[in-house]
Structure formats: structure tokens, C-alpha cells
Amino acid sequence: MTYVITQNCCKDASCVAVCPVNCIHPAPGENAFGSTTMLYIDPKVCIDCGACADACPVDAALPADVLSGADRIYVDLNAEHFARSTEPAGQGASRTDPLFHAWDRPAFDWSLPSDFRGLDVAVVGTGPSGLYAAELLLLHTRSRVTLIDRLPVAGGLIRYGVAPDHPRTKGITHNLGRLYTHPRVRLLLGIDVGADLSVDTLAQHFDAVIYAVGAASGKPLGVPGERLPGNHTAPEVVGWYNAHPDMPADAVRLRDERAVVVGTGNVALDIARILSRDADELARTDMADHALAALRAASVREVVLLGRRGPEHAAYSAPELLALRHLPGVELVIDDTDPRTGEAIDAAPQGSQQDLLRGLPRALLDYSSSPQSGRRIVLRFHSTVERVLGDSVAEGVRLVDGTDVLASPVVSAIGYGGRAIQGLPFEPSTGRVPHVAGRIDGAPGAYAVGWFKRGSTGGIGDNRVDAAETVRTLLDDAIAGRLSTPQRTPRALMRSVRRSHSGLVDATGLDRILSRERARGQASGRPAVKFATVEDLRRASRQR
């Protein structure tokens, strides 16, 4: 029986490198790799060796014959991808190099001069993009890496961006997290570069600095009323239920029986799913205790997802929509008010995004009164928000067609934006730093990876290819002599920071935090119970 890639594919592409028959696509180097949300295994080529399952950091590659219930649809999804693909697959791996595939030459060969010395590199940010960059430097050079994060705990997007009911996706921390204790890695956690530590000071202590600070702010709706309490951006809600220290326990209030989420991307679907799930099911995850308590006390029975365009343009991935379709005790409904919605679904090509909506119930819905009994998630397309309703608190949204959707909270899930770092250039319009192949414009020795580099596109695994480009650029600059010799050493910076920042957390402190969180979780049958404030994290880091 062949293997199948399932819901939690992170697009890391580790599976592609180990496949002996080149049956996993789209692969790096193929046109579709940049736009796909998951990889697929060709059932006609797979030889059932299981190499992909061994390599997958999130356990997404599984034998088809072990799948049951709703997961069986992934057998069809994998096969349908190759039935409709117009891009020719590769002809199999080279017999002389197991990491070389016939579809393309490796993007970076990592060849270095024999006398290449190790570099001292700082990586600002400990999410997946920063850790992939650090991993490449440690693998291919004798460089020493200092990981820096403004929070007193590492993890970034993996810790605070992945939905709590996706534990297998969070499993990538077992792979990347080993870097925290690597002998050539130092940790400086609880240091805000640009505020506590200037960009210039950092540059004086390292050969190069890689900025992997992500995109932590949400894009606003840009309509009247959006400043009302009860109107939130997606990062605020996601951070709230993931115990992010920036989000207080009472930051999000579930005031109504209906919530509205503007957007139809994966983050929007994550939020809708979390708000709709049974709290007892979420109590088995690492979800923030305060969010669990709020869900238990809330009366949310309906979540309305608003898409500005039609279903053919929806940004969700197939796995995330399928997760909604098979959510226990929750009905997924299509609002059929606009006839273009049904027409697009009925005309959908097999295997397309809108084809996944075929067979779902459709209805003309009224949002001016309490929702019907039971729980449901509504997809309403061709819906543009004109304003947020309410006087002292958000009470819903008015659409340009005059429809009022009465709901609270209102969540804007239309994208993420980066934040400027004092001392570095920044493009507010794109939410990213200007760069060429990862080299930050006008800042010699400074580089970018992840969403700070490319904007809020792509998932966890996309950062692997992204980091490879940046690290290759950095190494090319080092070989060409374009990097300045640092005036001081990383060790001198460590001494200085220890004197000036009493809340600094190192690798030992991080281990204490994570160990205590796991112990707290074990006591209640959960993977972990996170500390939700900076003070609690620092206190845990000091307890022996």
C-alpha cells in the first residue's frame, strides 16, 4: 500500500530529499512548489519504502491503509493532484547522489573554500525561519550561532502561531528544538533588538546578523469602527488562545452567540474552528488556560467567515477546510445569498479549492437575530465589510450590500504585517524589509529570512527554502570579503547583556521553562500548560 501525505503537511520537503523514486511533488525547483499548500505522493510511483515517514518532522506521511474515517479523503487528494497536474514530474533520483533529483539541480551546493573559517552569526528570532537558517550554518560550516529573541522563551511561530489542536504540526519543535543545546549555539532570550540592544551594537559583535523577526501585527480592516473594543486582528486572537505574553488573559471577550471572522485563509479557519470546538476536546491540548475558561463560559454557537471574493479565490488550504467539514458536532454551511457562490461551486473543476465545497448545505441566512440551535460555521463569499457596528463595543459588521451581521467579537484575519526595527530599513506598504536574495538593503552584514523577508506568505516548511537562499547569500558575501570584521566578540556581548538585563534567559533557563510546562501538563493529561506572562516565564527559568 502506498504512503499518503495528510492534513498537517508543513511543506518542509525533508521527505522529498529522501524519496528514492522521486514520487513526492511539487518539489523545490518545480513551478507549483511556491503556491501549493501541501505536498502529494504519486500512488503510481510510490514503492511503500516509508523513507518519507521517517523524514517527516510533523508525522504527515502515513501508509494509506492506516487511514480511516475523514482521513481517507487524503488518499483521493494525493491521487487527484497527479491526475490534474500539468507539470511533468522528475524522472527519479540520481543513482550517484541520493539528495539529487532529476527535476532540477540543487539550488545551493554548499561548496566552500577549504580555508573557510567559521563565522560568528547572530540570528534574531527563534521561530522556524531563524532556526532553519541556524541549522544550515551549523550543518555546512564551523560557524557559531547566537539565537536572540525578545521573549524569554524560544519558539516563535511554532509556539505561538500553530493552533493548539494541531499537535502534530507543533512536533517540528522536536526536530528544530535540538539546536537550543547545540555546542556551537548560545541563547539570549528576553532581549528586544532595536530597543534593549541596538542594531549597531549587534553588528559590532558579529560577522553577520540574520533577522528572523516574523510578522506579528495584523492588517486592519480600514473601515469606520475598527477601533472599538471587541474588534480584533487575527494575531491578537491567535496569541490569546496560545498564551502569548503580549496578550492578557482578558484581551478577547466572547460576548455573543455569534462571532464573525473576516477572511477565508488558513488562520481565519483556525480561529473559526477553535471558537467552535468543544472546550473539553481543547482541554487536552496546550491551549492557554484563560482561553479554555473563556470558551467554557461562552455561548458561541455560530462563527461566520466572510470572504471578499468568490469561493474560487478563497485562500484556505484543502486540509484546513476538510478539518472544518469533519468537526464533530459542528455543521459547515454555505450562505447562498449571492448566486455567484453556488454557480462557482457547481462549475468547480474536480480537485479545485471550490470543489471541496460541493455537497455542503446551502441556505439563505439571517444574521440579525440569534443563531439557530446547535453549532455551525458559515462561509459567506462576495462579502465586503463597510463598517464595524457598535457604539462602545463592537457588535458586528455592516456589509456593502447593506447586510448587518450582528456578532461579537469581530476578527480581522486578512493578513499579517511586520514591524520596523530601529536601525533597519522597512517597507510599511508590504510589511517587510527591502532586500536582495536576503541581503538587507543599505545594511552591510544584515540579512533577513521568513516573513520579515518575504511578507506573510507561506507556512512553516517554506522557511527552509527561504533560509537556504539567505544563508547562501551570506556565505557568498563572506567568501568574497564583503563582511566587516567585528570590533568585539559575542562573548563580550554576553557579559555586557548579563550585567544590564537581569531577566535574561539562556539555554539552561529555557530547558527549565519547557520542563516545567510539560510537568504541569502531565499533571492534567495535557502535552503542556504554558506560562502566559513574561514574569512567570522568567520565574520558571530561575527555578532549579
Image (cartoon, helix red, strand yellow):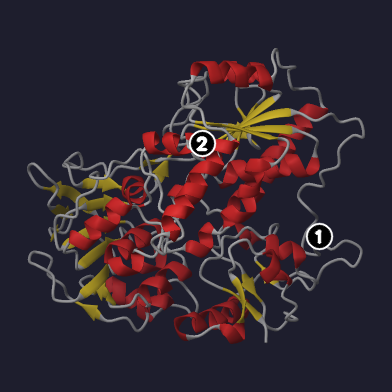
Say which residue appears at 51% left-offset and 27% top-offset: 504
Label 1, on which residue?
99
Q: Are marks 1 and 2 in contact (CB under 8 Å)?
A: no
Q: Earlier in the sequence, mark 1 or mark 2?
A: 1
Identity of the amino acid at label 1?
Leu
Judging from the image, what secondary structure is the residue with disc 1 in?
loop
Using a 10 Å C-alpha cutoff, classify the residue at mark 1 as few (fewer than 14 neighbours), some (14 to 19) or many (20 or more).
some
- In the image, residue 123 above or below residue 327: above
On the image, the x and y values in percent for residue 423 come to 51, 19
Q: Is residue 260 visible?
A: no
- Tell me the quarter of the picture where residue 366 sits: bottom left
- Side of 157 where 233 appears, left or right: left
Q: Name the quarter where the N terminus is drawn.
A: bottom right
- Side of 19 where 57 appears, left or right: left
Q: How many marks?
A: 2
Identity of the amino acid at label 2?
Val
- In the image, residue 175 above or below residue 156: below
Q: Farthest residue toward the top?
A: 487
- Side of 386 where 47 appears, left or right: right
Depth order, front residue of 349/532: 532
Label 1 – label 2 distance at C-alpha: 30 Å
- In the image, residue 95 above or below residue 463: below
On the image, the x and y values in percent for residue 158 come to 50, 51
On the image, the x and y values in percent for residue 376 come to 24, 73
On the image, the x and y values in percent for residue 188 come to 56, 30
Q: Is residue 341 visible?
A: yes
Using a 10 Å C-alpha cutoff, classify the residue at mark 2 as few (fewer than 14 neighbours), some (14 to 19) or many (20 or more).
many
Judging from the image, what secondary structure is the residue with disc 2 in?
loop
- In the image, residue 517 above or below residue 544: below
Label 2, on which residue?
213
Say which residue appears at 61% left-offset and 62% top-offset: 32
Depth order, front residue of 186/166: 186
